[in-house]
Image (cartoon, coloured by chain):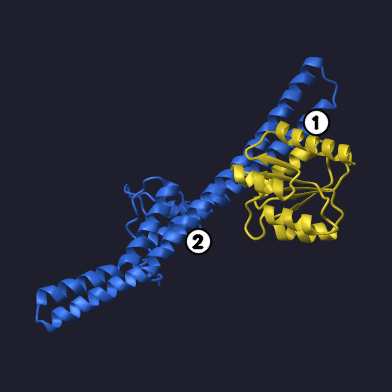
Chain colours: A yellow, B blue
Amino acid sequence: MTMNKNMRILVVDDFSTMRRIIKNLLTDLGYSNISEADDGSTALVALNQGNFDFVVTDWNMPGTTGIELLKAIRADARLKSLPVLMVTAEAKREQIIEAAQAGVNGYVIKPFTAQTLEEKLGKIFERLGAAA
Amino acid sequence: MNQVTPEARAALVQRLQAAVDALHGGDEARWRKELDLIAAWRNQPIMAGIGQIARDLADTLGELPLQEHAGELDDACSRLDHVVEMTEKASHRTLDLAERCQALADQLKRTKLAGEQTALVDQIRAGLSELALAQDYQDLTGQIIRRVAAIVRRVHEGFAALGLPARPAHATPANGLAGPAISGLDRNAFSQIDADDLLSGLGL
């Protein structure tokens, strides 16, 4: 996968302000095909309906959490290779390990800078490109 | 109800036996003492429950004294929820304005500008991006507030479980000032229109 600026991105966060901030940052980076979901279960519905290329998700959300969403994606035959970037305030070592073991592609800790987000995105696509 | 360990059961049997023996023997002081000890043993789960609640509070809030009235806790939670809503609205307003100004900066860049001016517009645009990103405080503080509210609710439930009265009291700080009014909670609060009406009624 390359950094296709037309890729469909799903931003998942229970806070509407954070969804908007991430959407703005992605738009600034040239991505314009962005949808939103407010928790893991609405995200899964959206993912099953549309052809998404990338997921940016929070961890701590009421209902289905980000880690549950990640595990559900990895367990789904159609979705399992979808790259997932976790953007979360959860910053404990064991949580980061848990996310990595669940198959996360990148992990950004809130609060974060635009540069951090760009770096992690770049790294994910670089690695996916090398693996392809 | 807590599980009774075999040791606790044995100790209880011993105490009951001692109380019965004292009763048979006519030793009033002794059977009263044994019954008191049994009563104290029964209260242990309640004491442990209170201890847990106090630890929960202390862990999250630091060393805060417990509220005087359990009813105030419910009110405090509603106020915390309201803070999250208020900051959410304020953040969206800031984001609206930042986006509008960014669009204006883009528009300005499309006009004929001197090199120095273009650099300045770029700096303004970058500053607006930073300003938008800084609104992430709303998510972060919101998460903390929700967590504290959840703990306060648990404390409230803990008090209810202990049978302490949960009076619907509205919290008023020591200086008697209620602070910002919260719609739905502060039913006696005045809007600007209410205030204007009142003042005009008073001839002002």
Of the two numbered discs 1 and 2 on the same chain, state the one appearing first in sequence.
1
Q: Secondary structure at mark 2?
A: loop
Above or below, B173 against B48 in this view is above
Disc assigned to residue B177: none
| Separation of residues labelled 1 and 2 (CA atoms) | 43 Å
What is the three-letter code of the residue carrying label 2?
Answer: Gly
Residue at (79% x, 58% y) in the render? A46
Residue A16 appears in the rendering: yes
Residues beneath discs 1 and 2 located on the same chain: yes
Q: Secondary structure at mark 1?
A: helix
Residue at (80% x, 27% y) in the render? B108
Q: Is residue B16 left or right of residue B81?
A: left
Q: Is residue B155 left or right of residue B11?
A: right
Residue located beneath label 2 in the image: B184
Q: Answer few, some or many: residues within 10 Å of disc 2's Cα (few below 14, many 20 plus, some between 14 and 19).
A: few
Q: Position of residue B163 (x, y in %)?
A: 35, 70
Disc assigned to residue B106: 1
Chain letter for mark 2: B
What is the three-letter code of the residue carrying label 1?
Answer: Asp
Residue at (77% x, 56% y) in the render? A73
Q: Quadrant of the C terminus of chain A?
A: top right
